[in-house]
């Protein structure tokens, strides 16, 4: 996200685009772009997005997630914080303080073509996709999530073979 880069605010792709950047190819159409960002950067990010023509989308608690739309494409920024032990946790909303998967932000960049972006680790992506319907029962299991999990697991198996 160019806006975050200009602010010096780290962001990480999550969801379907994170999977594609992990795999190095676009695997399906995407309806939105999902991000993680630090809660401390939320105000500056929101202000800068508004200045770049993004419109806020109401719904999520603003201390949990910021949602914007521009040119029909939704962008969701889920906010992160750290607990007293330094672990990454949910920043706000009804799950404030709940831990995210360990090592989630340690994957480094992913790539699609000439584009590079920090991504959520594939292991964390799998855990999040598996657990989201448990953590939030209002979100049903989706076929695309099962397909994403299978792709990511196959990628991790292939990486283990190459490292042996």
Image (cartoon, helix red, strand yellow):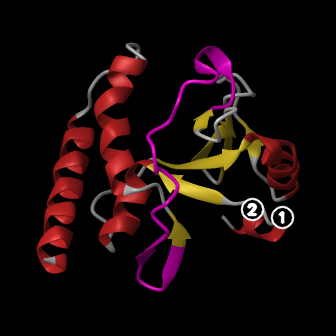
Q: Secondary structure at mark 1?
A: helix
| Tag 1 and tag 2, C-beta contact below 8 Å | yes
The residue that appears at 54% across and 70% down in the rendered structure is 117
Q: Residue at x 30, y 44 (%)?
A: 126
Please say whether residue 23 is one of the residues in the magenta stretch: no
Residue 32 position within the rendered picture, expressed as x and y whole percent measured from the top left: 50, 48
Residue at position x 15%, y 79% from top? 162
Residue assigned mark 1:
7
Cα separation between marks 1 and 2: 5 Å
The vertical placement of 96 against 161, above or below, is above
Say which of 133 and 30 sits in front.
133
Q: Quadrant of residue 80?
A: top right
In the image, taking residue 107 as reference, residue 24 lies left or right, namely left
Q: Does dot 2 land on a helix, a strand or a loop?
A: helix
The image shows a total of numbered marks equal to 2
Percent position (x, y) of residue 136?
43, 18
Main structural element of the magenta stretch: helix, strand or loop? loop
Q: Residues within 10 Å of mark 2 (few under 14, many from 20)?
A: some
Q: Is residue 107 above or below residue 64?
A: below
- Residue 58, visible in the rendered structure: yes
The answer to whether 53 appears left or right of 105 in the picture is right
> Was residue 101 drawn as part of the magenta stretch in this picture?
yes
Viewer-nearest residue: 136 or 123: 123
Quarter of the figure that contains the N terminus? bottom right
* Mark 1 nearby-residue class (10 Å; few <14, some 14–19, many ≥20): few
Q: Which mark is residue 23?
A: none
Q: Which residues are magenta?
A: 90-116
Query: What residue is at 43 percent from the left and 76 percent from the top?
Result: 111
Q: Mark 2 — residue?
A: 4
């Amino acid at each position: 996200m160019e806006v975050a880069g200009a602010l010096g605010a780290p962001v990480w792709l999550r969801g379907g685009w994170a999977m594609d950047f992990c795999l190095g190819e676009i695997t399906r159409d995407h309806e939105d772009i999902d991000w993680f960002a630090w809660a401390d950067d939320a105000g500056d990010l929101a202000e800068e997005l508004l200045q770049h023509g993004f419109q806020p989308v109401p719904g999520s608690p603003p201390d949990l997630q910021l949602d914007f739309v521009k040119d029909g494409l939704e962008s969701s920024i889920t906010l992160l914080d750290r607990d007293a032990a330094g672990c990454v946790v949910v920043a706000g909303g009804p799950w404030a303080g709940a831990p995210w998967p360990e090592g989630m932000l340690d994957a480094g960049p992913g790539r699609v073509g000439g584009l590079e972006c920090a991504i959520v680790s594939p292991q964390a992506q799998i855990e999040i996709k598996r657990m989201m319907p448990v953590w939030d029962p209002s979100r049903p299991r989706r076929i695309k999530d099962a397909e994403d999990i299978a792709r990511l697991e196959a990628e991790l198996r292939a990486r283990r073979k190459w490292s042996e």
